[in-house]
Amino acid sequence: MTTENVLINKTYYQSLLDDNKQSHPIKLLGDKFREEMRTEQPDLSSIRYAQGEVYFMNGDYEAAVHKWQFPLEPSLVPWAQKNIADAHMEMGILDLAEKFYHEVKTESLVLKSEVLLQLFSLYIQQDESNKAVNTIKEAVQLHPDYGRITEIAQTYFEDIQDWDSAIELAVNEAIRTQAFSWFEILQGYAEHGLTTNIDPTYFKDCLKTVIQLDPKRFESLLEVFWKSYRGSTNYIEWLSVCNEILLETLPDQTFTWEKLPQLFADTFFELISGRFLIREIRDVMNSHVRNWLTLSSANALSVSSAILAWDEIFPAELDANLIKEAEQLYAQSPAAHNGREEGLLIYEAIKVWAEKEGLLERLIEYMAPIIDHEVITQANPTTIRNMIKEAISFLMEQKRELLVSIKQDIQWNEERQTEIIDMEQQIRDMEKEKATTMITSFQEFKEKLKENMTSKIPKIIRYCSELVQEDSDFTKLHVELNTEMNKRLNQYLGKTVMYEYDRYRKQWLESCENEWRDSQETIDQLALQMNETFGEERVKLKGDFKVLEDWQRDLDRMSRGLILREEVNIMLRKNASQLLLKGAGKILGSITKNKDMLYTRYKNYIENGDYSDIAEEIIRPFLQQMESFEDSIEWDVNRFFTNSYDVLNVVNEEVQDEIGKLQHTLTTLLEKPEIYRDPLTLFELRLHHYELMNRIS
């Protein structure tokens, strides 16, 4: 039976060639094929398989597939199926290649592994990363020792940053092979923070394995995991797993630990720093101090003091034998030498916590008579102990006062919120009042202009009767009159009306400016009152005086409507009287005796005509602009106050946020009193540890 390595490399054909013959393999196999055909029962299976290999190696993939599709001996059939898939993959027909790979049926682990590796390569080409991951995982699970399969998997997982799969591979291979290289790879992942979100229990078997192989490597790996989990939500769970492993293995270890004693010491003080609630650390404390004690037999003062201090604050929680052992070690240990520094560190930690809780100023004020800053740096541990004790007692009493203070702060902010709402309503009432005043005065301005123009325009037209003379050319008189009437109207509009309009406009804008300034004074006074209440400049209200500039521009532009761009048709209309006059002028105008009659009729017509429709036609475009402006006044008045509303809205939201925070704090203090109480209890624990360390009665 040929070896699988020959079949993998497609060099099976070499076993059929005569070493003494130097011709091309295709010719030699062809000769061998013809020779076999001459036998009574020719067996062409191996020759055809070999021919397929040679065709494949020479890039004739279709010919190779053709040869491998013939009936072959059973041992070659699954390899031929795999080779057909290889050929389709080389031709870029990936869908068919995938199909043929899945059709390979074999019991050979080697062939199964080769098929999976080819599928893995195919899925990468197709950019099917999920399929590629699942396939290489299947290959590793099937035959992890095959070739470089685990190295290929690791490289791919890292390339696509599938860190969960990379970590899973490293853990499994570290346990399976016990090779230090896999522990080093896992340690690298932990150093980069890639394991932080994984349940620490997952690494338990791996850590158990490495501690038996090499305690020093275990210590190094444990330290890296420790640092990576610190600060994460899995930290307490990590400590539980770590302590469980060490409880099982430390009694049998004679190794001298370099890093673990300090890690355990630092972690103990971290756990009682106030960052964690007591219920979070309770369950892990017994095993933690037990392991710490086992690791620190050479310097047992701190750990024995920690055990005795915990038992003092939380009696009956630690193992009785552990307490007895701690008492014996404590009795044999000398007192600490850095008592002052340690005590001051505890006091500083209390101040940091008090600041976070908003109690630092009260604490400093209370402690001021007690602390002599010139002497404190030289104080003995007992003096510092007394100072810490006073601070803790004071803060314990502050909870009741804190609840009262928070309730008062909530009420104070709610009152400010009511004032803000009232202030906004005052401003809105003022806005409505100012809008009414300005609209009313503008209407008066508009009506005065309209009244004057409505009265004056007909008079100007009637005064044009003086242009009719007895010797006028009545055939053209109506045209001449129309031109002159327009000229006089334009003079009236451009001078008299423009002057009146400008005078009324200035008066109106001045009155509006006074209204705006009055409004600004009012909102300034309201803001001042509010800021005095807040004790800081929280509210700064500013009216938008640009509204006045916009009105000035719009009213200036509006005045251009007072100029007649085209002649108004006054004497050229087709009413009966005008038609009669024009007709009579053409027929009778050249007859001298009829001129007196035309003269009289023209004079009477002009002097007695009704020109109200002409006046309305001239006035209408200008009035429409004024009415449009009038309609916008209310909106512009609102624009003046918009900044004030926005500022009040922002301040109101800030006050509401403050109320929300205070209510959350109040609810937390009432429903979860341990959030305030536990840090102070742990400060008492640290104080008791300090007393024990410094032999303070």
Image (cartoon, rainbow, N blue to C red):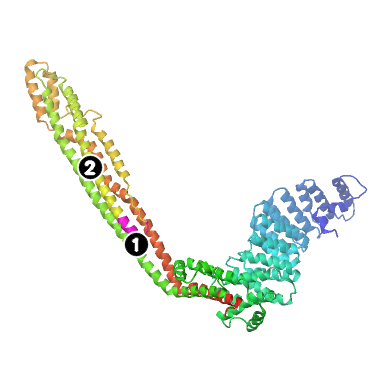
Tell me, yes or no, if residue 17 can be seen here. yes
Which numbered disc covers residue 508? 2
> Where in the figure is residue 157, as x and y percent of width and height?
67, 57
Instruction: Name the N-terminal-most of marks 2 and 1.
Output: 1
Tell me, yes or no, if residue 678 can be seen here. no
> Where in the figure is residue 337, as x and y percent of width and height?
63, 72
Q: Secondary structure at mark 2?
A: helix
Q: Quadrant of residue 476?
A: top left
Three-letter amino acid code at the position of disc 2: Trp
From which residue to which does the magenta span run? 526-536
In the image: residue 254, left or right of residue 513: right
In the image: residue 190, left or right of residue 628: right
Three-letter amino acid code at the position of disc 1: Gln
Image quadrant occupied by the N terminus: bottom right
Residue drawn where x is 84% and y is 46% of the image: 26
Q: Secondary structure at mark 1?
A: helix
Query: How many discs mark residues in the rendered view?
Result: 2
Taking depth in this image into account, of 189 and 59 the one nearest to the observer is: 189
Taking depth in this image into account, of 636 and 450 the one nearest to the observer is: 636
| Rendered view: 146 above or below 298 | above
In the image: residue 669, left or right of residue 215: left
Residue annotated with mark 1: 417
Residue drawn where x is 58% and y is 75% of the image: 690
> Where in the figure is residue 450, as x and y percent of width and height?
18, 38
Residue drawn where x is 23% and y is 33% of the image: 562
Image quadrant occupied by the C terminus: bottom right
Q: Is residue 531 magenta?
A: yes
> Where in the figure is residue 453, as x and y percent of width and height?
17, 35
SS assignment for the magenta stretch, majority: helix
Which numbered disc covers residue 360? none
